[in-house]
Image (tube, helix red, strand yellow):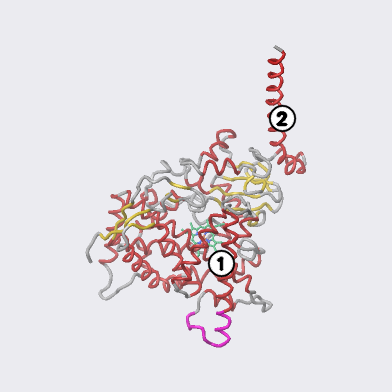
Amino acid sequence: MMEMVLVLVMVWLIVFGLLGLKWVLKRVNVWIYESKLGEEIQEYLPPGDLGWPFIGNMWSFLRAFKTSDPDSFLRTYTTRYGHNGVYRAHMFGNPSVIVTTPETCRRVLTDDDSFQTGWPKSTMELIGRKSFIGISYEEHKRLRRLTSAPVNGPEALSAYIPYIEEACTTALEKWSKMGEIEFLSHVRKLTFRIIMSIFLSTESENVMDALEKEYTNLNYGVRAMAINLPGFAYHKALKARKKLVAAFQSIVTNRRNQRKENLSSNKEDMLDNLIDAKDENGRTLEDEEIIDVMLMYLNAGHESSGHTIMWATILLQEHPEILQKAKEEQEWIVKKKAPGQKGLTLKETREMEYLSQVIDETLRVITFSLTAFREAKSDVFVNGYIIPKGWKVLTWFRDVHLDPEIYPEPKKFDPSRWKGYTPKAGTFLPFGLGSRLCPGNDLAKLEISIFLHHFLLKYRLERTNPACPVMFLPHTRPKDNCLARITKTTSN
Ligand code: HEM
């Protein structure tokens, strides 16, 4: 009897102890981050909680994004707190507010007086302190001005078309002879080749393959927990950054030497632009600055377009009637070419109305950039709640794009929803908004259009595992990287 009582007491103590421990642990982040805010601010904090010490809410985020239902992460907030569109959480090592509606995302992305860029420190270590995500407002404005037109201006885009076409047709032809391939890995190499040519006029196969591999490792670390220990993705990513920096340093040093000896080619690329850039006081950029800007551009400029090309191809192939309509449009583009005209023109790519709807729908359904990061510069009221100074803000694009109120049957791939439809402000954000709107958006659409033009005219995709599960981190992709064969539909 006595023993029974003792066991019961022990069990009771253990249960009580565990509950007490949970109660204490759940309050650690509250004590650290919320108690110092003052009562008035605390009263207006958005609903939510700051999770566990150190990991915050990352465990729920990673768990949800490792299932087939990543949206279950935010659903727990909407179920518990309603559709306020503003929730507090502890994400990527910081007290944060997640905003999920067109209005709140738009407000955060366009209000530069109240918000600045706010990528987690771990991301900054990987992408670079001197890249766009680490520099001052003024410096960012200057470097954007300097780099935007040579990437995205109509003149530049027209000049890139022959190279992009050549790269796409050569790649498709080569893949069609290779049997089964990892389609995503090959498309990434293709988009990397294109961005390398724009930035560095380089085409060395070996250099490109080696750099692209390091970028893959870098990106796995960007959305992972920042644990710098062997075996963890972040540790591997830091090592990849070191290798990339060393490779770019030798490229910059070589170019400077070639320029000194007048040995560089006549063709100006982005590296020349960056070396030549001077501010109003005549200050030029140091190697470290050039390297971080290039490292960022080359990363942003190939991962996203590579994934989008893959998804657009998969989605077209999965919807024969949409594929047929897109193909007919491309045949029409070819048919109306002037005699003797070989390549595509910028005007023709802008006449691909249906293809543009296919691409927009792909960007919406897949939402390559799940979220952007900002930081509140002061205590800011959004939707009736306060975002405290210094807290991060995550604009959750995925939720906006999959909102059934905005896009009925949101998971359905339906390019025709874009016919004659102009999205309301903040409802379509694949490229972000405001002063940090993607500076490569037109280039990306151009690359994707040119690839699909040639794909639709001559090829088809046969996936090895069409029902392969999808992974959502670091970016949405089939687990097998889209194992497939590219085959010809015509013999010419
Ligand atoms: C489908 C393709 C692409 C998608 C979905 C995409 C998406 C985005 C998004 C959402 C942002 C905004 C991030 C923020 O607000 O913090 C962004 C920024 C950026 N993108 Fe893209 N992008 C694509 C292609 C490209 C290409 C081709 C380039 C390079 C030529 C590029 C270069 C950049 C750069 C440098 C930034 C940082 C801008 C800044 O901070 O001012 N992107 N991109």
Left or right of 140 in this view: 302: left
Residue occupied by mark 2: 20
In the image, is residue 336 above or below residue 394? below
Q: Residue at x 69, y 39 (%)?
A: 44
Q: Earlier in the sequence, mark 2 or mark 1?
A: 2
- Quadrant of the image for the C terminus? bottom left
Local packing at callout 2 (Cα closer than 10 Å; few below 14, some 14-19, many 20+) is few
Return the mark for residue 244.
Answer: 1
In the image, is residue 74 above or below residue 274? above
Is 128 contained in the magenta span? Answer: no
Q: Tell me which corner region of the image, top left, top right, bottom left or bottom right, holds residue 247.
A: bottom right
Range of the magenta residues? 254-267
Left or right of 149 in this view: 322: left
Q: Is mark 1 within 8 Å of ligand 1?
A: no
Numbered disc total: 2
Q: Is mark 2 within 8 Å of ligand 1?
A: no
**Measured from the top left, where is residue 205 in percent x and y?**
43, 71
Is 260 contained in the magenta span? Answer: yes
**Measured from the top left, where is residue 294 in percent x and y?**
56, 68
Return the mark for residue 31.
Answer: none
Q: Tell me which corner region of the image, top left, top right, bottom left or bottom right, holds residue 136.
A: bottom right
- Amino acid beneath label 2: Gly
**Measured from the top left, where is residue 341 in percent x and y?**
29, 74
